Image: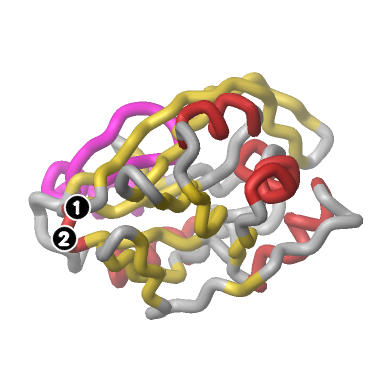
Amino acid sequence: MAARIDHLVTSGTFSLDGGTWDVDNNVWIVGDDTEAIVIDAAHDADAILAALAGRTLRAIVCTHAHDDHIDAAPALAAATGARILLHPADQPLWKLTHPDHSPDGDLADGQVLTIAGTDLRVLHTPGHAPGAVCLHAPDLGTVFTGDTLFQGGPGATGRSYSDFPTIVDSIRGKLLTLPPETVVRTGHGESTTIGAEAPHLEEWISRGQ
């Protein structure tokens, strides 16, 4: 059976720079009936375990280390034995949430993760966070963008560890080069496509988000 994509929404909070906000997060599960990976273990390890439905969890992939994307990762890893993977540039953010628990492995630009016979290529896309990554699965016609690209524009860059020109460069160089029909599955909110977002790049730059 080919890999499929399961989608779960979990709710909790995001905290940084002294503020806390209520958020709903997209959790993406990629795999088949026997094995899977989780992209962003957000808020509720028990809900993610239930969605896995007994499948072997091979890895917990973190698109970046803001607390709302990683808060359930250690508990999910403890319950499943899966390795937590994070780009090393986000270690400072990770330590803000989990000072006593380190990720189990590094993500690197160009690295390929394979699950259920399907390849996901790691794209390092800094800007929203220094170690932000996206995962491109060409056989599934999709890219998982975390908080780098949303329906309507780039991820927020108004807080610590973020930079607007950097995220624009990442989107231009790593994402808008993908086929326009590629489905963009985001860290929050609705999905979109590369083709739908590409025409708005100059507008984003002029707004200077």
Q: Magenta part of the protein: which range? A: 184-209
Relative to residue 123, is residue 11 drawn left or right?
right
> Mark 2 to mark 1: distance in Å?
10 Å
Mark 1 surroundings: few (<14), some (14-19) or many (≥20) residues within 10 A: few
Amino acid under disc 2: Asp
Q: What secondary structure is marked by label 1?
A: loop
Q: Is residue 95 in view?
A: yes
* Residue at image point 67% right, 64% down: 90
**Horizontal and vertical percent position of residue 75:** 73, 41
Dot 2 or dot 1: first in sequence order is: 1
User: Which residue is the site of mark 2?
Assistant: 139
Residue 5, given in percent of the width and then of the height, sits at: 29, 41
The residue drawn where x is 56% and y is 59% is 163
Tell whether label 1 touches label 2 (CB within 8 Å). Answer: yes
Q: Which mark is residue 188?
A: none
Which quadrant of the structure image shows residue 150?
Answer: top left
Instruction: Report x, y in % for residue 143.
Output: 28, 54
Q: Quick check: is 188 in the magenta stretch? A: yes
In the picture as drawn, the residue positioned furthest to the right comes out as: 100
Amino acid on which disc 1 is placed? Ala
Give the residue number, with chain letter if any, for mark 1: 2
In this view, 80 is above or below 7: below
Element type at mark 2: helix
Q: Is residue 89 left or right of residue 96?
A: left
| Image spot of residue 115 (x, y percent) | 36, 61
